[in-house]
Image: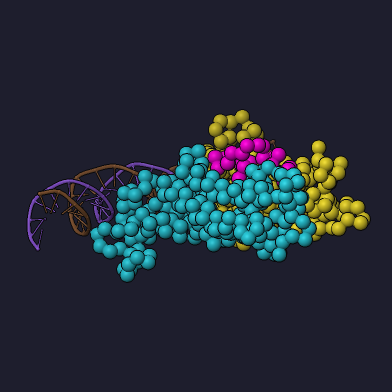
Chain colours: A yellow, B cyan, C purple, D brown
Amino acid sequence: MSWSGHGRGGRRGYHHGNLREALISAALELIARKGPAGFTFAEAARQAGVSAAAPYRHFRDRDALMADVAQRGFARFEARLAAAWDEGRPAPLPALERMGRAYLGFAREEPAYFSAMFESGLPLAEHKEVHEAGDRAFGVLRGACEAMVAALPPGAKRPPALMVALHIWSLSHGIASLFARGDAARRSLPMEPEELLEAATLIYLQGLGIAGPATGR
Amino acid sequence: MSWSGHGRGGRRGYHHGNLREALISAALELIARKGPAGFTFAEAARQAGVSAAAPYRHFRDRDALMADVAQRGFARFEARLAAAWDEGRPAPLPALERMGRAYLGFAREEPAYFSAMFESGLPLAEHKEVHEAGDRAFGVLRGACEAMVAALPPGAKRPPALMVALHIWSLSHGIASLFARGDAARRSLPMEPEELLEAATLIYLQGLGIAGPATGR
DNA sequence: TGTACATCAGTGAACGCGCGTTCACTGATGTAC
DNA sequence: TGTACATCAGTGAACGCGCGTTCACTGATGTAC
């Protein structure tokens, strides 16, 4: 709503000028407030200050909008993970920790995107763009694990990077969706989710022989 | 639907005789087919072969039914985890592996319960019974970790059992909800989810110094 | 064993509501000349 | 620089639909005597 000085919804005449974006914002706001189920096409239109028929100019139906939100969510997620990883600087381990924090941060700060991505019930098979956007985000984590494995000293035994990436993804995702999510379904925890994840990651890497008992901070 | 030889819905006259149960079955079936959002009070009634007003004799509203389903789900989940753990027989490690498999099996075979429990968006703060049922289920895992830690040789250093339980819960939950779930949102994986979980658990326990490199199978 | 009665789990009609979707339309915008 | 026109993003009225919820009611069941 920052592109113009007009009232609610930001109309600037007969043509909205930015309806597609406004509908996405409205969807995010509704999902954040009422969950993925509590967003309707009609209410998104109302919130954008537009008639109920207008959204059909931009999205085939409700699901198409939801898929668009999920896809954008994955793109933002990917960017955030990549920024946190920062090509493994200054060293793979702390960069990986940073990426774990980014995962939890995303779930906490962007609950609407998070649930559109993971809990909207969109059948992935029918939404290739969403599926692929998700794969690209996972690719960042996978790349990080490959770099980490590649950086091991020559003599060390090398665990399969894909497996490591899947393990860390699952762990992060479990903690994010149980304890770090930014909505009412969050469970309480006697510590920060970030600490829980960091401890688990270190123990796991230690089990792989990658991190020594004294590593980390 | 096994308690009587009548047609669809199993009516046996003016009184249904088992409406409460029939509504819960209908809810499960609808959730399994269309996700937690795609179940309505009205359709559950229709499926039970009863008028739209009848459910109000048994549940205050839609959410009350959903909460009941979630609570039952947690109770079944708890029972299944406890049976798998079997008090740690014959030894904590294989029993823990069994429990991990039970977690994934539940997500796969009872997708409706699973999503009612974890993805229905019920605010836990407003549904104490659900929250407590969830805590009891987690209690099984926690008890298992306590037993496992207690069984360590006297000299070994003992990790905090609660932390271990939270780590294993998160890991199992992440794998279950990403890869093992029994509905259309499942992501594909180049291996069995069970293998992924077992490998992760072993590596993790190794990192804790509990399982040796040669342990497991 | 039979009858009267209380209780309770259902009915079905009615209501208001919001959603999704279609339709012919119209106002705004940009562009060719 | 002005005008004619094509294009496009909106309108608003209309439709059918299913949901949630209330209401006075009625049929079935169990039990006291």
Percent position of residue A163, x then y: 75, 58
Q: Is residue D8 above or below residue A192?
A: below
Between B3 and A127, the one nearer to me in the picture: B3
Residue with the most extreme front position: B154
Residue with the most extreme bottom position: B5
Start-end of magenta stretch: A174-201
Between B96 and B45, the one nearer to me in the picture: B96
Percent position of residue D11, x then y: 49, 42
Q: Residue at x 61, y 39 (%)?
A: A189
**Quarter of the figure with the C terminus of chain A:** top right
Residue B213 in view here:
yes
Q: Residue at x 43, y 49 (%)?
A: B68
Q: Is residue A185 magenta?
A: yes
Q: Is residue B72 above or below residue B105?
A: above
User: With A175 as the anchor, is A82 left or right in this view?
Assistant: right
Between A171 and B201, the one nearer to me in the picture: B201
Q: Residue at x 67, y 64 (%)?
A: B192
Percent position of residue B186, x then y: 61, 59
User: With A77 as the anchor, is C26 left or right in this view?
Assistant: left
Percent position of residue A182, x then y: 60, 39
Q: Is residue A22 above or below residue B1?
A: above
